[in-house]
Amino acid sequence: MSGLVKDNIFDSSGSVAAAAGGLSWQPVVTASTVTVSAGKGYFINTTSNACTITLPSSATAGDQIILVDYARTWGTNAITIDSNGLNFQSSDDSYTVDYDTAGQALNLVYSGSTVGWTPSSDIVNALEPVSPAQAIFGFGYTTTHVSMSNLVSGTGVVATDTTGVGTARVNVAGAEYGGDKGIFGFGNNSGGRTAVTNLVSNSGVVASDTSGVGNPNSGIAATRYGGDKAIFGFGSITDGVGTKISTTNLVSNSGVVGSNVTGVGTARSFTAAAGYGVDKALFGYGLTGGSLSMTNLVSNSGVVSSDTTGVGTARHYLGAASYGTDKALFGYGLETSSRVSMSNLVSNSGVVASDVSGVGTARNYLEAAGYGFGQAIFGFGNSGSVTNISNLVNSSGVVAADVTGVGTSREGLGASSFG
């Protein structure tokens, strides 16, 4: 007799229970074969190879063995059960018993010679591990416009340059959309302001240019809102004199940029923007004829509110990012003619706090993005010359000291979370 017994998933839930006397858990198994014993538990790691598991050749009713998918890789490299002459669920060992579901755990109990080994529970942990968010810095200016990018790992490590894709430009903005992707948009290239955008995949790959929608704009800001959408806002348009605006452009959860929405609030450029309160956002600070400290809240449907009187030092050319899952912070920038490093925390109701003394090198023309589990990073900018240093922000909003830079020093770039 031959055939295939596959998965054997009962409709059961809960934890795999040990026998009354307890189990002896063994070291993680990475070999392609292993012989197991009753009264023991085994973590089977099939990351590198499949594994054949040989059960004992003799057993007594009540004997128990537990097998656990250690690395959630049984879906790629399955385990095969060799019942070693004894029955398995009433079938003799001429059957192939194959378990190939990621996250599975088997509680095998021997019931006697007739039925043999039986999974008393055969559960799958449906909770996939959550990967930390990553971030990306892109575009900017060295002594010329550039389009390279630098990925930031889920632990805040900035990677070396990735060759640029899309129109090289400065004073772009970046934001997350779709829950796990990003978008860079607008900015100045060597020929003037532009409205082109570049989508970023959930693995951090920057796509080629998408034709612009809205005003060619420079010094614009962007952020996510509504959980899975984004918004570009404010900036300076091409009209001969570089008029500052408060117009916005909404981005759908599939990365499509909408047409101009009439601006609300004081027209200005070189603001910063970040999400707060899970699904809302705010634009803050900026430049008119001088530096400002006002903010404009954005609802979870993308509606921008009128000006809120500013808190903290008026400045522009600053960065902003979400942190702690539902809060935000503004940091660094240019106060009139002096570079600063102070920050301002934003509560989960959108209230901006007073200045927190600066940490790290004072600079402007930098950017920021969230990463990891509620952390953020400020990076690059100009401290008197272009730089590539970064400063990590923990999940409580505390800014850390400078981290030696990686990648090409530059200013006027954009940043976004992804993944």
Image: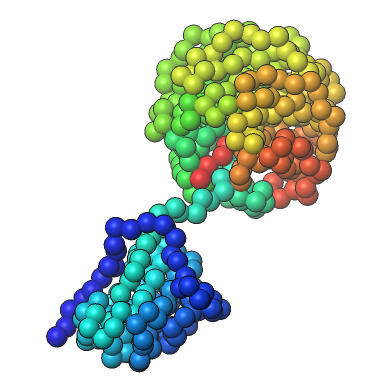
Residue 154's x, y, as percent? 60, 50
Residue under the point 44% across and 53% down: 127
Tell which residue pokes out farthest to the front in this image.
Answer: 20
Residue 55's x, y, as percent? 37, 85
Q: Where, quadrant-wise, is the N terminus in this rendering?
A: bottom left
Residue 158's x, y, as percent? 66, 49
Nearer to the camera, 325 or 120? 120
- Is 168 drawn above or below residue 73 in the view shown? above
Residue under the point 30% across and 75% down: 118
Q: Quadrant of residue 64?
A: bottom left
Q: Quadrant of residue 291?
A: top right
Colour mode of the rendering = rainbow
Residue 165's x, y, as percent? 51, 43
- Left or right of 354 on screen, residue 215: left
- Left or right of 227 on screen, residue 80: left
Residue under the point 45% across and 54% down: 128
Residue 108 appears in view: yes
Q: Quadrant of residue 401?
A: top right
Residue under the point 71% across and 37% down: 396
Tell which residue pokes out farthest to the left in this image.
Answer: 1
